[in-house]
Amino acid sequence: MIEVNLFSINSVDPNTLVGRCVARSRFDLDTMGVSVMEYTKKFMRENLDTLESGLGNSDLVGLINSDINMTVKDFYSINYLLSQVGYKITLWNVADDEENPLEVPDGDGVYEINIIDNCYLQNDLPTVTKVMSASGDSLVDTLENVVNQIGLFKDDHFNGVDNPLEKLIRALKTERDISGSINATITTKLYQVLEQLGIKLFYAASEA
């Protein structure tokens, strides 16, 4: 199953790890008989009111509305322009029964953490699993949950190797126990190591 999302993001930092889910749709590539780009363009059209107000460019809106086939490079070009005005579209694979098929649940402090695994590509797209984080959940415990799920440095293959991810989690826990706060430097390092290992996290909140 392929999931298409429209997120609102901070236009000052297009590479931000956090966004709000404006729209979401899923489709089965094998049964629907359309390409990923065809479906993505249809998704853009369905959300054209939002995109048009952000883009403010009639020619670009005309391209989205046209019958011209959208190439992958067209998609990346449009997505770049969207990021400059506070939006981005994501494409990734999800399991058929992955949670939150239509939206991110509403709630103060509720986040859907999308674990984007570039080690497992299907249809040239990364695969995502989702972990929910509720208000009051510890970021350290949430990150530990993520690290335990992603399957890197498995003990049966890397016995005797000091897992760098677990090492950073231990450091975060120690800092939390001593100071009562989350060490931003260690957290940033953890995100950097995850990215080196092909894993990115995206925290999605409800648009409501």
Image (cartoon, helix red, strand yellow):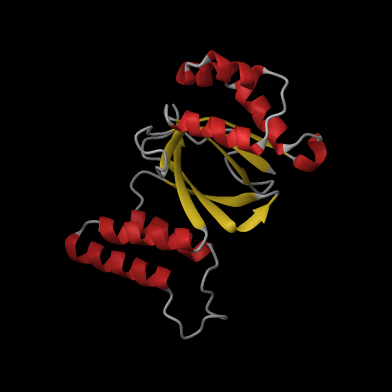
Give the tally of numbered discs.
0
Give 116 or 133, whichever is nearer the viewer: 116
Would residue 100 be visible to someone looking at this image? Answer: yes
184 vs 100, nearest the viewer: 184
x then y, percent, for residue 52: 52, 17
Measured along the vertical axis of the image, is residue 64 above or below residue 95?
Answer: above
- Image coordinates for residue 29, horizontal then vertical, percent: 76, 41
Judged left or right of residue 40, residue 59 is left
Looking at the picture, tell me which residue is in the foreground, 7 or 155.
7
- 22 lies left or right of 162: right
Q: Does 154 sit above or below residue 37?
A: below
Residue farthest to the bottom?
A: 160
In the displayed structure, would residue 59 be above or below residue 193? above
Q: Which of these two is toward me, 12 or 134? A: 12
Residue beneath the point at 57% across and 37% down: 76
- Vertical placement of residue 24 versus 170, above or below: above
Residue 7 in sight from this viewpoint? no
* Quarter holding residue 69: top right
Measured from the top left, where is residue 182 in percent x and y? 26, 56
**Image spot of residue 208 (x, y percent):** 44, 26
Figure quadrant of residue 25 = top right
Q: Is residue 13 left or right of residue 103?
A: left
